[in-house]
Image (spheres, grey):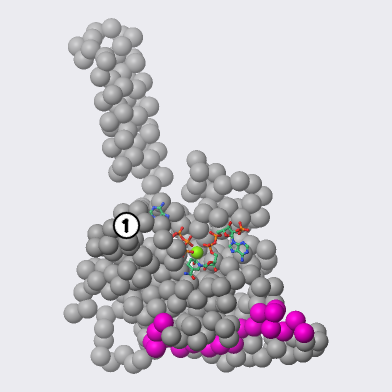
Amino acid sequence: MLVKHGVVIGLGRLTSHLPSSSSSSVLRRQQFLVRALCGSQIIRAMSSTSEADAESILRTVTPSLDPKRHKGQAGKIAVIGGCREYTGAPYFAAISALKIGADLSHVFCTKDAAPVIKSYSPELIVHPVLEESYNISQLSEEDQRTVQDKVLGEVNKWMERFDCLVIGPGLGRDPFLLECVSKIMLLAKKSNVPFVVDGDGLFLVTNSIDLVNSYPLAVLTPNVNEYKRLVQKVLNCEVDEQNAEDQLRSLAKQIGGVTILRKGKSDLISNGEIVKSVSIYGSPRRCGGQGDILSGSVAVFLSWAQQLKQDPESPSENPAILGCIAASGLLRKAASLAFTKHKRSTLTSDIIECLGESLEDICPAS
Ligand SMILES: NC(=O)C1=CN([C@@H]2O[C@H](COP(=O)(O)OP(=O)(O)OC[C@H]3O[C@@H](n4cnc5c(N)ncnc54)[C@H](OP(=O)(O)O)[C@@H]3O)[C@@H](O)[C@H]2O)[C@@H](O)CC1
Ligand SMILES: Nc1ncnc2c1ncn2[C@@H]1O[C@H](COP(=O)(O)OP(=O)(O)OP(=O)(O)O)[C@@H](O)[C@H]1O
Ligand SMILES: [Mg+2]
């Protein structure tokens, strides 16, 4: 629409110097060419614009609060992330999942990060199971393997209970830890558990693309840096802003049809076939942690969209695409509301506080 307006204004400017009553064939031809050019721009802009109706998708995928449902049916999410440096990111992702309506939210993090994350919230179930190199470097190779098996055993005993994992917020880049996480991805794939890969999970995946290649239940949520690295690695070229939609489609196709949510001024979403955008006005504040809210939210909406799939009346679109659109729309609405209240001091926690009110506005609880 904005592009359309831009073109219409441009047309007015371009033709304003031409006398409207001119009978000169040259002038008439110029006017015709200008209109034809601008007209085709409008058509091109409209046909390439694939803005999703995020509010309507939010209404479709959000389940009603049915008293017959038991704990767990509205979603069990697990975040794999949280290390010495980063405790905020996994907390933001996990608490956002609960605030949107998931029933249970787990965090699998390192031993150092666990007490800190627990102290942020008693609502989260925190497993201090991940290990970093500095803790095991004095061990023999065999003992290191035993530690890794123990970590994987701890995660795997829960795996089938989860509706979706979020892999990467605040994970860090420790090599031993990332090796364990790559094996956690293999376990999730074996159990057909969907996962959202974000933050340092994307660092891991970009260097080992096979971890997600052709897994239809994988969603990648890169920010500007993470996207650049993915494009360079997978497509062997630079990011092309002029052909952003086509490039995203090619990237998702090249990784075997995984869903990619490219974060930015507009969020762009593709599974290698369709491309959708979500451009609802959000917030001009770019404080850290908003991507973590998004990854936790995608996990919840994806799980809800998966449940809907069992209903023959359900929308035919891929649950991962629906989950991404719903999460992006809700985050932007909450960010906008938080900014109205807090202006320059808006923080990620303020946006999390607005998730409930924003969802309520679209899908009232009763
Ligand atoms: N409150 C919290 O706890 C929050 C924690 N957060 C968590 O932070 C982690 C990184 O995510 P981010 O978004 O800062 O990564 P991004 O924009 O690609 O990098 C920016 C620049 O930093 C650099 N760099 C990063 N890590 C590096 C490393 N280990 N060692 C060396 N360089 C490193 C990076 O360099 P490059 O990747 O280009 O080599 C780039 O230049 C991730 O786990 C995220 O979840 C966020 O969610 C926010 C809230
Ligand atoms: N320039 C922008 N204008 C409006 N919204 C934006 C802009 N850039 C990002 N966003 C919104 O903020 C959300 C988070 O994107 P961002 O690029 O900040 O992620 P991130 O860097 O991974 O965040 P985090 O700090 O949590 O790691 C996106 O879903 C998007 O909707
Ligand atoms: Mg991030």
Q: Element type at marker 1?
A: helix
In what quadrant does ligand 2 lie?
bottom left
Relative to residue 148, is residue 62 depicted above or below? above
Q: Based on the displayed image, in which of its 4 quarters is residue 152 positioned? A: bottom right
Residue 218 rendering spot, x and y as whole percentages: 54, 70
Report whether 154 appears left or right of 341: right
Q: Residue at x 27, y 15 (%)?
A: 17
In this orientation, does residue 318 appear?
A: no
Most extreme residue toward the front, as rendered?
345
Q: Residue at x 34, y 36 (%)?
A: 42
Whether residue 195 appears in magenta in the rendering, the answer is no
Query: Where in the figure is residue 38, as x and y percent of width and height?
Result: 35, 29
In the foreground, 361 or 137: 137
- Stretch in magenta: 120-138
Instruction: Inspect this view and state whether residue 27 appears.
Output: yes
Q: Is residue 98 above or below residue 276?
A: below
| Residue ID for mark 1 | 344
Relative height, residue 362 to residue 253 (above, below) = below
Task: Check disc 1 and give the amino acid type.
Answer: Arg
Q: Nearer the viewer, residue 29 or 4?
A: 4
Q: Give the left or right position of residue 106, taking residue 18 as reference.
A: right
Quadrant (top left/top right/bottom left/bottom right) for the N terminus: top left
Q: At x 31% / y 35%, what residue is drawn?
A: 6
Label 1 packing within 10 angstroms: few (<14), some (14-19), many (20+): few
Q: Is residue 124 magenta?
A: yes
